[in-house]
Amino acid sequence: MTTSTERARVPAVEGFFTMGDEPQLIGGRLETGGYCFPLHLGGSDPRCPAGSVEEVLLSRRGRIWSFTNSAYPPPPPFIITEPYVPIVVAAVELEVERMVILGQVTPGWTVDDLEVGMEVELELGVLYADEDTDHLTWQWRPLLGADIVGEMVGAVGGGAAGEED
Amino acid sequence: MSEGTMEEIAVLGVGMHPWGKWGRNFTEYGVHAAREALADADVDWNDVGFVSGAITVRCGYPGYVAGSTFARALGFNGAQVASSYAACASGVTALSVARGQILSGACDVAVVVGADTTPKGFLAPTGGDRPDDTDWLRFHMVGATNPVYFAMHARRRMALYGATPDDFAMVKAKNSRHGVHNPNARYPKEYDVDDVANSPVVSDPLRLLEICATSDGGAALVVCSMDYARSKGITDPVRVAGLSTVTPTYPDTVIDLPYLATDSAAAVEPPALGFKDSIGAQVYAEAGMGPSDVDVAEVYDLSSALELDWYEQLGLCAEGEAESLLRAGETSIGGRIPVNPSGGLGAFGEAVPAQAIAQVCELTWQLRGQAGGRQVEGARVGVSANQGLFGHGSSVLVRR
């Protein structure tokens, strides 16, 4: 028997993302070089005759292409947690993959906090919970200025952050 | 105007059952519309050689075999039959099948018909766990309803082109002014920008009055070869000069329902024309015409903001100029290029398999000068545009 401190964390659907502190979406790479998501449900390049797709992990960071919310609870198969708090959804552009991926925004943010072009990072969040298990989905967490500058300084060994204005 | 790439067919008759939330069997609406179209065409049902039904997936087995269901209800007459499903583009897919039958010589005259009976609320996937179905996944893993996609496109216009919520509300207000003159509209009521602003937000920035409802309704066409039209003494019928049901060209880099992601442009640059632009481009190419030839348009305002996208995708204005066109009144009746004189989805709500057919009905009335209080004076060329899902979309160009 598990206690509340030992709640299991499982993907709501298997095969969409890796678990752990730095989760990544599991996508595909076509033999012609393009990417797809989800791995087995993405669009294919017609020049890719064999249709072979290699599993790859996608970038954790991207920029908001657009965003909105759902003021009313979505219908099934969405599972509503009462009381319903409007979910916020963002379409996020990944630079390397040159594609846009949809996802919820992490809880606590509203549309008033977001802007097109804002940088976000992938996290896992609770889609719905039952007695002893949290069922997880991928979510985009907006990065505040401090996160971005801190990362930049770390990445280049300091000093170059001033270029990013 | 240049030579088109396709032979034309004639639209001899059109008919509709009024849109509403009637709650009756969809067959009744389809039969009503078909009988009206046959009477309008002055064609005997027994002369019809082909029945092309647009499928509804919400009305059980009779909906899946819509062509046969309507044919039986009209009285089986030995005609050939087909049923087509292409989400919101189903009606034009059914028209394209009928055109193929006519142009191949398989029949002279065909009836195209679609009708629906709809439940309340959001359209949602059918039941059961289907984690290999992108339509199921977008609801389950994200909660991405149709309005979520519509709203992301609206927000994108705000970010790129400086659109405002007032612009979106103006689209609704314009279409409602047109729709009050349409006896087939479900909401023949005039709304202004304040009415829209006072309705609740569904998906920011879109409000309830800007999101297409689901409706019951039915629409039908009687189409035939040009020779058949001449044999009936009709020398100047409304004719289908172009019809487009193109799929996207890889990579499609604009997120749209029901997908979780776009294609990737990492290996191949996006095509010069995006998916929705390519729908219009194909119809113009078939007809040998261009946007400057068009007098009137019926476009799919699933949301108020999506109508603005269509202005640009059909080439009625340059990219980023839709708001200026709207604000100048050019897309209102009396303007340079009236859009949705029928009232559009804003005045109708969507009866999925009937809607793309209803657009052709409206354009036909417009080109015949029979549109009453919503008539676009002197209209000779009309174009429709429609968005389905899963890479379906459609456009029809009709002319006198």
Image (cartoon, rainbow, N blue to C red):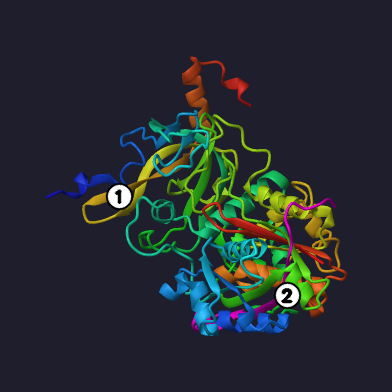
The residue sitting at 46% across, 38% down in the picture is A36
How far, Cα to Cα, is label 1 from label 2? Answer: 57 Å
Viewer-nearest of labels 1 and 2?
2
Q: Sort mark 1 into few (<14), some (14-19) or many (20+) by Cα contacts within 10 Å.
A: some
Residue B367 pos. (x, y %): 80, 70
Q: Residue B294 carries which label?
A: none
- Which chain's residue wears label 1? A
What is the span of residues highlighted in magenta in the rendered image?
B1-28
Crowd rating for badge 2 (residues with CA inside 10 Å; few <14, some 14–19, many 20+)? many
Relative to B247, residue B95 above or below = below
Quadrant in the picture for residue B364: bottom right
* Left or right of residue B371: residue B92: left
List the residue tagged with mark 1. Answer: A135
Tell me, yes or no, whether the highlighted magenta stretch contains residue B26: yes
Residue B229, compared with residue B295, is above or below; it is: below
Whole-percent x and y of residue B299? 69, 62
What is the three-letter code of the residue carrying label 2? Answer: Leu
Which residue matches tag 2? B12
The number of discs equals 2
Chain ID, mark 2: B
Which residue is located at x 52 percent, y 29 percent? A96
Q: Does the magenta stretch include residue B279?
A: no
Which residue is found at the position 34% from the left and 55% from the top? Answer: B130
